[in-house]
Amino acid sequence: MSDYLPKEILVEILSKLPIKTLVQCTTISKSWYSLITNPNFISIHYNTHSIKSHRRPLLFLRHYNMFDKVERYALHFDNDDDEEEEEGDVVDSFEEYLELECPKTSCNEYLRIVGCCNGLICLSDDYDKYTDAVVLWNPVIRSHLELPRPNLGYNGRGSCVYGFGYDGFKCDYKVVRVVYNSTATEDYKLEIPPSVEFLDKLRAVKFLVPPGVEVYSLSSGAWRTVSDVCGNYMLHQNHSVSTFVNRGVHWIASNSSDDDDGSSSSSSSRSSGNGKDDSFIIAFDVGTEKFSEIRLPDSVAERSVMKLDVMVKGALLALIEYEKFWQSDYCWIWVMKEYGVVKSWSRLHSIDLRGGFRNVVGFRTHGELLISARMVGMVSYNPKKRSISYLGIHGTNRSFHGEPFFESLALVGREDKFVQQENSTSNVVQEVGSILDNGEEGTEGHT
């Protein structure tokens, strides 16, 4: 049938099919396999399905149970409770859609979730004890890719920060790795809450700046050093993972404490007239592979980086400001309404964390906050109603992770070579034919 259709028509038809059907379509012919596994088609399919208004949004969750020592991953439906009440809908807004099986076993208690972007999840195994293992994972099509060993050496006694994003112009996923080696002569493990002895030991460590920076590109399958030099500042990953929004990976940053005379103060600190210990945000554009700085509101810039987290709320860059580093009574939610414009920072909510609540884990699709809490696990907080919903998700506080998720074909064909499966051909052709006849889109099912 495809022999009689122009390629652009075939692409339009196939882009409307659900993922499960398209995976089957790759077995029809080599030409279909080549088309469906092409990064440009994967991007078209993702964009087509991500804007469907009738699709129930999904939420990606991870938690670690310290008793059975198992990481648990799942996709949940993430409906708007307010809309359901207005429409009289009785569907569970947090129903589990798909339980996921992680392809990687951690050498630590659990993996670090570097980021989640366009249906692909990046994991690293460096939470407590450093390893250079990094994995890209598409949980929906059950495909994963273990990245090759990085080029830049790391002694495990400094800081190795990862970021993950998508270059929309080249339809390419990228992992950025920023390596700070140090002068430390012994290994040390992060303590939470930090003891006085630990903090004194940490202050004595000198991190070598500027750091080394390298990028892994999925299209090339290799690491390479980035020519743009990262400044003399320190990138931090506190409660949150790296944040991808507006083509850039974002981290909280502070000026390096190694420069006693202040000569390495960043342009943002100098221009604001504040001291060298000010906090700010560093963005790495995954397309241009350039670093840039984003200033924080003046009142927040004076905060220690240990009291700040950067996240994404919808399509906006968000900032979490805590009262103190550990066991804060309050936190405040900021969003940058116009990306890159400092004056557009706006404080949206003040969150009362008293009563055993720890920190903000992430945002749900419709603006609710996911918060880790002692004893009751992960909860959902509605800032409009100031109400809490208990989700039944339990685990260690640091292991909680949650963010909106959109299914995609990313990594399709990366693990398996083309295999002709004639027994699946007739069903696929019939479904494609029905779209031609009726002009209707297929319905996505569980994969």
Image (cartoon, rainbow, N blue to C red):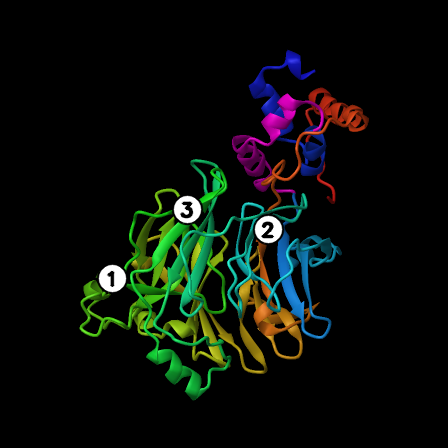
Q: Residue at x 53, y 34 (%)?
A: 39
Q: What is the residue that sits farthest to the bottom in this orientation?
A: 196
Q: Give the distance between the C-alpha atoms of the residues marked 1 and 2, in whole angstroms.
A: 34 Å
Q: Tell me: 275 left or right of 407.
A: left
Toward the viewer: 386 or 402?
A: 402
Q: Give the distance between the C-alpha atoms of the residues marked 2 and 3, in whole angstroms.
A: 17 Å
Q: Label 2 amino acid?
A: Phe
Counting residues from the start of the chain, the first of labels 3 and 1 encountered is 3
Residue bearing mark 3: 247
Q: Tell me: 394 left or right of 338.
A: right
Residue bearing mark 1: 268
Toward the viewer: 268 or 424?
A: 424
Start and end of the magenta stretch? Answer: 27-54
Q: Which structural element holds mark 3?
A: loop
> Considering the image in quadrants, where does the C terminus appear?
top right
Residue 426 placement (x, y as % from top left): 79, 24
